[in-house]
Image (cartoon, rainbow, N blue to C red):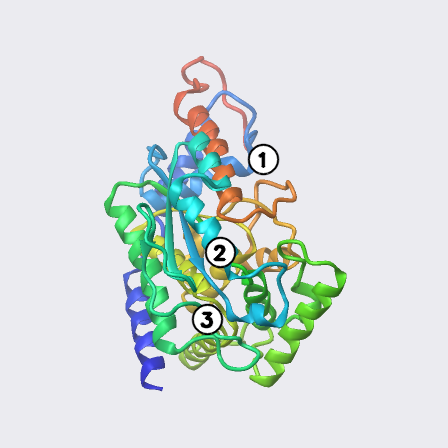
């Protein structure tokens, strides 16, 4: 209980530091879009994203020049139950490639003009590589079918690491961050957390991850259901009411779920989402794991939501349910399932192109034309 209270106290302190986005700046951005000589709302969700970014940055003079992707890397003990095609050594290899600049996310980030920051927040192996940041208190989580995945202090340390990573990059002048992850078994941890937080059967939120066959998916579902029953986990959707008791209970149940069946990468990504709200940096989400982290962060501190931007609707079935809960409309529908933050990075060039139109196109006033009327 003492360690749980430390986590709750830390989160309350984070919540006190979160201020709402600047709605006036957002409205100014919207007016500027509507003044540009083109069909109103012609760039659709990209226009909405830039309005949201204006509100986050507190100015209609949007800046996206300096970009980064943060890749949280960790291992998951649940792979002992055969829920993945590969073992923890793949986490080690891919993380090493990310640190060396050789992975898919590095190639895509190079095209998008973004810097890549891999962070070891709980890998089983200890890597010492230039370019790899190490912020971990344990070497992988435990098998959550047999015992809780981690201790309260491990969870808090990983959440802190995510918040502090956002702070470091904000201080470094980055204008927008994408989130990614690397960790064999993390679609199982994410599906388990999503199942509990959304109050949905594992069958509805669990997919093949990195390529399981039908029997593998059935085994994965059985493991999640068995663990949820064994640990008596279950929130069954948002709690009713908005009183202090309900808020406190929601935070406690969310943290218990994260600690019991979650992963250290999930914890760190949750912290990064919270950090985006504290330091007023737009956070671009990637696939399932980052979506679950966003859901977790919003259950802990609802004010975080306005600082998050979805990039794509991934193939894992939980994503649609999570985005419906968060009322998110992802821009990209391309059946992406690569991870590492690649889908989030794919949104960067689209935002850059929209920003170019936003900044440089002539307005109706410049052309001495009557503006379109907005009937939306």
Q: Which mark is residue 375?
A: 1
Q: Nearer the viewer, mark 1 or mark 2?
A: 2
Is label 3 or label 1 in front? 3
Tell how many labels.
Answer: 3
**Helix, strand or loop under label 2:** helix
- Mark sitting earlier along the chain (2/3): 2
Q: Residue furthest right?
A: 214
- Name which residue lies at 51% across and 37% down: 346
The residue carrying mark 3 is 141
Residue 171 position within the rendered picture, expressed as x and y whole percent measured from the top left: 23, 46
Q: Between marks 1 and 2, how big is the CA–CA gap?
A: 51 Å
Instruction: Please name whichever residue, 72 or 27, is drawn nearer the observer in this view of the structure.
Output: 72
Residue at x-position 49% and y-position 48%? 340
Q: Is residue 209 above or below residue 43?
A: below
Q: Is residue 59 left or right of residue 325?
A: left
Residue that mark 2 sits on: 91
Q: Quadrant of residue 35?
A: top left
Residue 364: percent from left, percent from top? 46, 19
Image quadrant where residue 335 sits: top right
- Under circle 3, the secondary element is loop
- 263 in relation to 34, above or below: below
The numbered mark, 1 or 2, whose residue comes first in the sequence reads: 2
Other residues around mark 2 within 10 Å, as few (<14) / some (14–19) / many (≥20): many
Tag 3 near tag 1, CB within 8 Å: no
Quadrant where the N terminus is found in the figure: bottom left
Q: Considering only order in the chain, which callout, 1 or 3, is on the residue closer to the N terminus?
A: 3
């Amino acid at each position: 209980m003492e360690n749980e209270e430390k986590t709750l106290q830390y989160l309350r302190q984070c919540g006190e530091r979160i201020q709402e986005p600047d709605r006036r700046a957002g409205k100014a951005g919207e007016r500027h879009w509507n003044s540009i000589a083109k069909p109103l709302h012609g760039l659709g969700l990209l226009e909405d994203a830039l309005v949201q970014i204006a509100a986050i940055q507190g100015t209609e003079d949007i800046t996206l020049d300096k970009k980064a992707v943060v890749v949280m890397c960790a291992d998951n003990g649940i792979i002992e139950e055969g829920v993945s095609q590969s073992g923890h050594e793949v986490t080690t290899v891919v993380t090493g490639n990310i640190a060396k600049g050789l992975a898919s996310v590095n190639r895509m980030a190079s095209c998008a003009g973004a810097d890549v920051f891999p962070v070891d927040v709980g890998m089983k192996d200890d890597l010492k590589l230039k370019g790899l940041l190490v912020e971990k208190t344990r070497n992988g989580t435990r098998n959550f079918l047999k015992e809780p995945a981690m201790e309260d202090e491990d969870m808090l340390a990983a959440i802190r690491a995510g918040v502090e990573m956002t702070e470091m990059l904000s201080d470094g002048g980055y204008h927008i961050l994408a989130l990614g992850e690397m960790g064999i078994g993390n679609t199982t941890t994410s599906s388990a957390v999503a199942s509990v937080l959304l109050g949905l059967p594992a069958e509805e939120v669990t997919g093949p991850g990195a390529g399981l066959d039908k029997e593998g998916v059935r085994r994965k579902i059985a493991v999640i259901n068995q663990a949820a029953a064994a640990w008596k986990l279950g929130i069954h959707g948002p709690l009713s009411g908005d009183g202090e008791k309900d808020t406190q209970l929601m935070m406690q149940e969310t943290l218990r779920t994260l600690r019991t069946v979650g992963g250290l990468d999930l914890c760190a990504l949750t912290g990064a989402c919270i950090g985006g709200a504290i330091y007023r940096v737009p956070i671009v989400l990637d696939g399932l794991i980052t979506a679950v982290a966003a859901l977790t962060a919003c259950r802990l501190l609802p004010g975080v939501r306005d600082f998050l931007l979805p990039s794509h609707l991934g193939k894992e079935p939980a994503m649609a349910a999570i985005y419906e809960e968060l009322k998110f409309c992802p821009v990209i529908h391309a059946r992406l399932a690569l991870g590492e933050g690649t889908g989030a990075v794919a949104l960067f060039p689209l935002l850059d192109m929209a920003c170019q139109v936003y900044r440089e196109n002539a307005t109706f006033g410049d052309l001495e034309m009557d503006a379109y009327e907005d009937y939306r």
